Amino acid sequence: MKINLNRKIMRTRIGKICERVIAVSIGAILLIACAKVDQEILLPEEVKEWETDVYVIGNERNGYKNVAKIWKNAAEKVLSDGSNDAFAYDMVVSGNDEYVVGKEMFGTKGVAVLWKNGEKRKLTDGSKQAVAHSVAVYQGDVYVVGRESNGTKEVAMVWKNGIGQALSDGSNHACAYAVNVVNGDVYIAGEEQKDKKYVAKLWKNGAGQNLSNGANSATAYSVTVHNGHVYVTGNEYIENTNRATIWKDGIVQRLTDGTSSYASAIAVTDLGVFVAGGQYNDIKMVAKIWKDGVEQVLTDGKKNGYVYDLSVSGQDVYALGYEEKENSNGSISEVAKLWKNGVAQNLPGVANSLLVVRSEKKK
């Protein structure tokens, strides 16, 4: 009995010791874990480094013909061989692929063209006039918009992976100027003639919506989507005056009073709503950017200045256009300009659009 009792006591004591050891071990583990957590919290967050590529899309004369080109961070890349006039109007980068659209002249006919990584693909056969104005890529599908003549009228077109689809029925002139694909929905901005006036149009997945009522001529040049809201910008001609206009979910907002103005492009981020355009100062056109309706002047108004496109990357705002220059012989020429946060830089050739790509720097 004593032996059994002693064994029982020993087992009990050993059990208690084990409990204490387990408790101490668990406590130690928790202390170590807490120390690691505290250590991780105290470590400074890794600062992301970004790199920015700035693409300018346009053309430059070789002495005889217009050559389609892009400039990446000022480095030139030639798209056409110079045997025909060619023009590049828009661009998108998807992964490692670069897509540029525009037109090339074959005889008297313009052919809508897509260049992928510099390799040309004709979207139309050249039997009728055509042009590609804008491009977007979504999940590997390539969307190009523009217009093609049916022999009597200009038809607004979208080409998906090279297959053309008409957005207008061909009974009136129409054109698609911009495309944006968000969550699989395809938004296209443009115009269609109604009687003798043009109506600003928004097509969503092929279904057209009139943004203006047809009482005045209007055109939509740019479309973007942010936080579920659809923003379109363009112009409406009211009482013999062109007016810079935004349509947010179809609701009209004017950027200027009765002074002649225009809006060519829109970008919306968490920083605000940015619109590129200009306003007449009774003498010259002044290039401007509006942020949430508040203007920033880019040119001094002594010479005509225009903005065609803009892009917002991080905290930086880029704009693209030109300013007139008076030559020594009294003639006027146009100098392509890139503005970064309001500071201008001269560019070669003719600049038609802008693409800014911001990516995390590879380590």
Image (cartoon, grey):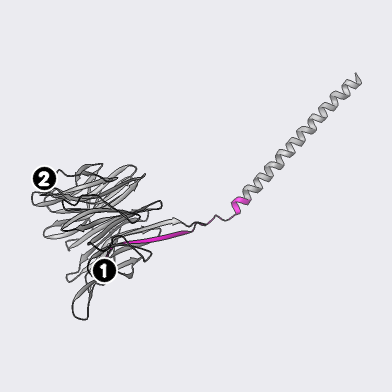
Task: Identify the secondary structure beneath mark 1.
Answer: loop
Query: Which residue is depicted at the point 17% across and 58% down?
Result: 107
Compared across the picture, whether 196 is left or right of 141 comes to left
Q: Nearer the viewer, mark 2 or mark 1?
A: 1
Q: Is residue 336 magenta?
A: no
- Could you say which disc has been placed on residue 62 in the image? 1
- The kind of residue tagged 1 is Asn
Number of the label disc, if any, that sits on residue 249: none
> Is 154 on the left or on the right of 337, as rendered?
left
Magenta range is 39-61
Residue under numbered circle 2: 171
The image shows residue 345 at horizontal and vertical percentages of: 33, 70
Secondary structure of the residue carrying numbered label 2:
loop
Percent coordinates x, y for residue 216 in the rendering: 12, 53
Which corner quadrant holds the N terminus?
Answer: top right
Q: Residue 46, image x and y in percent?
A: 54, 55
Residue 10 or 92: which is nearer the viewer? 92
Of 156 and 285, which appears nearest the observer?
A: 156
Indicate the amino acid at tag 2: Ser
Does the stretch in magenta take in 46? Answer: yes
Q: Residue 67 appears at what percent x and percent y?
A: 26, 64
Q: Residues within 10 Å of mark 1 (few under 14, many from 20)?
A: few
Q: Is residue 221 visible?
A: no
Can residue 361 be seen at all in this image of the molecule? yes
> Could you say which quadrant of the image residue 52 lies in?
bottom left
